[in-house]
C-alpha cells in the first residue's frame, strides 16, 4: 500500500458527491432510488450556448489559451459584472477557472497561510472547510439557525474576528439553505469587514440568478469593502452548464494575478470550447433563463407545501438557489426496525434505505439538525419523493 500524504489522509470526501455515488450504486443494483442530493439543474444547456460551442470548434479554438481565460471572455465577464451587479472590474481583474470550486481554492491558496483563521458561516457549502484545512488554515465557524433564516449578524462577525482573521467565505444565495442576504444585511456586515483592512471576503454568488425576491446584491457593490472582496461566479447553475466546468472571479488586481499564477501551475487555462460557450452565456440577458428560475420557484413552493404537511419537519422559506434545508430534530430519538435516529446522518441513511430517496445530511454543511433536499427535479419526481419521505417518517416512533 502506498504511504499517502497526511494532506490527503485528512481530507474528507465531499458528502454530496458521496451520496450521489451511493445512489448510483443502488440504482445499478436495481433499487428505485430518487436522488435529490446533487446541486445540478435538471434542464439542458440552452441552445444558443451550445451553438456558440459548436462555432468554437468550427473556428478551431483548439490551442492552448491564456491561463486566466481568453481576453474577449474576460471582457464579457467584466461587462456582465457591470450589468448585473453594478461592479466595475477590468479584464485583468477576471480569472476564468475550471468551475467555481477551482476559483475558490485559487483564492484560498493565494491568501491563506498556515495558522490563519478563516471565518465560515454555517451552514456552509461542504467544500469551504476542507479547502481551508488543506492549506493549513483554521476554520472559525459562526453558527446560525433556521429561526433567523441561517444568516449571521454583524455582532457575530465582529466577535469572530481577531488579529489572526484573514478571510471569510460565504455564499449568497446560500448553498445549502437558499437564504439570501438583503442589501441592508450586507451593508451591516460590510461595516464590520471594513474595520480590518487586511481581512478579505470570498463572496460566492454562483446562485445569483436563481433568486425569488428580486435582484441579488453583491457584497463588492459596497465601496467600503470593494478592495477586500473577491466575487466568485460561474455559469453552472443559472445556465445549466455544470459539465462545462466554467467559474470565474472578479478580484483586486493583485489577488487576480496571484490566482492566475497558481492556476498556471495547476491546470493552465480551462477548456477552450467551454470558454466559447461561457461567453455566450454571460453576454445573454438574464431574461433568457427566466423560464428556469420560474420553474425552480414553482418547485420550491410545491416542496414547502408538501413537506409542511409532515409533522415534525420545521421549515423556513428559502429565497434563492434550489434547496430546502429543514430542521429535523423532532425525529431524534425515534426508531423503526433496525434504524435508530440520533442524528441528521442517521435520518438521511434511513430515508435512503426505507424511502429510497437520497438526501444529504446537514452535518456535511456544519448544521447537524438539518438535511438538504435539492428540488432540481421535475414536479412529478418531487411529489413522489416527498410522498415516500412522509410515509417513512410516519413509521418512526
Image (cartoon, rainbow, N blue to C red):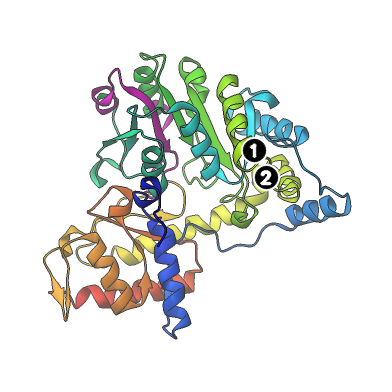
Taking the image as shown, residue 231 lies to the left or right of residue 284, namely: left
* Residue bearing the label numbered 2: 270
| Mark 2 to mark 1 CA distance (whole Å) | 7 Å
- Residue nearest the observer in this picture, 200 or 382: 200
Quadrant location, the C terminus: bottom left
- Residue 176 at what x, y percent from top left? 38, 50
Q: Quadrant of residue 345?
A: bottom left
Q: Which secondary structure lies at badge 1?
A: strand
User: In the rendered image, is residue 178 in sight?
Assistant: no
Residue 357 versus residue 243 in the image, above or below: below
Q: State which mark lies toward you, 2 or 1.
A: 2
- Residue 327 at what x, y percent from top left? 24, 55
- Residue nearest the observer in this picture, 280 or 12: 12
| Magenta-tinted stretch | 156-184
Residue 56 versus residue 351 in the image, above or below: above
Residue 234: which disc?
Answer: none
- Residue nearest the observer in this picture, 226 or 167: 167
- Residue 383 at what x, y percent from top left? 41, 72
User: In the rendered image, is residue 131 in sight?
Assistant: yes
Q: Residue at x 62, y 31 (%)?
A: 260
**Circle nearer the N terminus (2, 1):** 1
* Residue bearing the label numbered 1: 96
Cβ atoms at labels 2 and 1 below 8 Å apart = yes
Amino acid at each position: 500500500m502506498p504511504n499517502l500524504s497526511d494532506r490527503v489522509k485528512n481530507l474528507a470526501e465531499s458528502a454530496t458527491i458521496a451520496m450521489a455515488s451511493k445512489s448510483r450504486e443502488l440504482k445499478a443494483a436495481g433499487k428505485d432510488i430518487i436522488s435529490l442530493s446533487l446541486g445540478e439543474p435538471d434542464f439542458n444547456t440552452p441552445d444558443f450556448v451550445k451553438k456558440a460551442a459548436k462555432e468554437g470548434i468550427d473556428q478551431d479554438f483548439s490551442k492552448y489559451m491564456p491561463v486566466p481565460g481568453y481576453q474577449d471572455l474576460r471582457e464579457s465577464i467584466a461587462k456582465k459584472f457591470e450589468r448585473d451587479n453594478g461592479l466595475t472590474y477590468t479584464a485583468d481583474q477576471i480569472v476564468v477557472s475550471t468551475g467555481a470550486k477551482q476559483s475558490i481554492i485559487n483564492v484560498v491558496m493565494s491568501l491563506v497561510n498556515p495558522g490563519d483563521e478563516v471565518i465560515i458561516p454555517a451552514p456552509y457549502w461542504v467544500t469551504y472547510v476542507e479547502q481551508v484545512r488543506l492549506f493549513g488554515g483554521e476554520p472559525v465557524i459562526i453558527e446560525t439557525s433556521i429561526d433567523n433564516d441561517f444568516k449571521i449578524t454583524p455582532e457575530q462577525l465582529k466577535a469572530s474576528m481577531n488579529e489572526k482573521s484573514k478571510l471569510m467565505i460565504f455564499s449568497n444565495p446560500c448553498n445549502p439553505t437558499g437564504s439570501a442576504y438583503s442589501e441592508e444585511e450586507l451593508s451591516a456586515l460590510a461595516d464590520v469587514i471594513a474595520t480590518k483592512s487586511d481581512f478579505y471576503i470570498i463572496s460566492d454568488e454562483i446562485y445569483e440568478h436563481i433568486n425569488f425576491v428580486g435582484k441579488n446584491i453583491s457584497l463588492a457593490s459596497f465601496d467600503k469593502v470593494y478592495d477586500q472582496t473577491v466575487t466568485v461566479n460561474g455559469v453552472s447553475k443559472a445556465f445549466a452548464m455544470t459539465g462545462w466546468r466554467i467559474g470565474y472571479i472578479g478580484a483586486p488586481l493583485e489577488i487576480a494575478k496571484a490566482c492566475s499564477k497558481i492556476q498556471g501551475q495547476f491546470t493552465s487555462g480551462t477548456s477552450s470550447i467551454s470558454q466559447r460557450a461561457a461567453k455566450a452565456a454571460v453576454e445573454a440577458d438574464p431574461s433568457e433563463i427566466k423560464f428556469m428560475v420560474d420553474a425552480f420557484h414553482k418547485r420550491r413552493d410545491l416542496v414547502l407545501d408538501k413537506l409542511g404537511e409532515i409533522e415534525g419537519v420545521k421549515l423556513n422559506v428559502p429565497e434563492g438557489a434550489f434547496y430546502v434545508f429543514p430542521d429535523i430534530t423532532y425525529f431524534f430519538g425515534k426508531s423503526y426496525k433496525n434504524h435508530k435516529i440520533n442524528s441528521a446522518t442517521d435520518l438521511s441513511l434511513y430515508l435512503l434505505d426505507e424511502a429510497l430517496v437520497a438526501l444529504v445530511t446537514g452535518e456535511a454543511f456544519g448544521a447537524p439538525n438539518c438535511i438538504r433536499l435539492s428540488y432540481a427535479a421535475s414536479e412529478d419526481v418531487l411529489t413522489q419523493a416527498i410522498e415516500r419521505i412522509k410515509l417513512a417518517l410516519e413509521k418512526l416512533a
